[in-house]
Amino acid sequence: MDLLNLPATTKNPPELFHGDAWVDYLAVPQPGTDQRAVVTKVRFAPGARTAWHSHAHGQFLHVTDGVAWFGTRDGDVVEVRPGQTLYTPPGQEHWHAAADGCFMEHIALMESADDPADSVTWAEHVTDEQFHGPQA
């Protein structure tokens, strides 16, 4: 058994997030193993959101606090509340965010690609209209 020395809380970069969001790594693949799971806790300030992105092997997102919004390229936005889990399949472009007016926290689980740099493909920022809908 090993007690892990994981990185400190990190603020997510503005190139990939609109607004303030912080990540804590809870589990990462260990050297010398074939492990691929990455588990993080991500906390979003009200209205903060990711840029468009997709995951090589999909992603599970379990909301633990607040109200989350998850959007897809076809314009669907799903509201997820504490205790609910959302799955995004491999390659599906999506974004996640805290709803306006509340903080949101989720646990994210994904599997790394063979080359960890290929695990997440990032794209452009989500526009206000995509985030709020046509009334924005």
Image (spheres, rainbow, N blue to C red):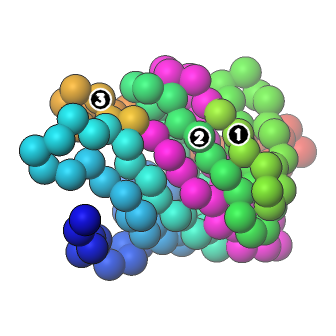
**What type is the residue that disc 3 sits on?**
Ala
For mark 1, what is the residue? 86
Across and down, in percent, residue 111 comes to 39, 36
Q: Is residue 63 something one can see in this rendering?
A: yes
User: For mark 2, does the 10 Å Cα neighbourhood hold few (<14), some (14 to 19), or many (20 or more) residues?
Assistant: some
- Element type at mark 1: strand
**Region rendered in magenta:** 88-110
| Corner quadrant of residue 66 | bottom right
Depth check: 53 or 19 in front? 53
Q: Residue at x 54, y 51 (%)?
A: 108
CA gap, disc 3 to disc 1? 20 Å
Q: Is residue 136 left or right of residue 30?
A: right
Say if 73 sits above or below 30 in the image: above
CA gap, disc 2 to disc 3? 15 Å
Q: Is residue 113 left or right of residue 110?
A: left
Q: Residue at x 50, y 46 (%)?
A: 109
Across and down, in percent, residue 104 comes to 70, 67
Whether label 3 touches label 1, CB < 8 Å: no
Depth check: 11 or 129 in front? 11
Whether label 2 touches label 1, CB < 8 Å: yes
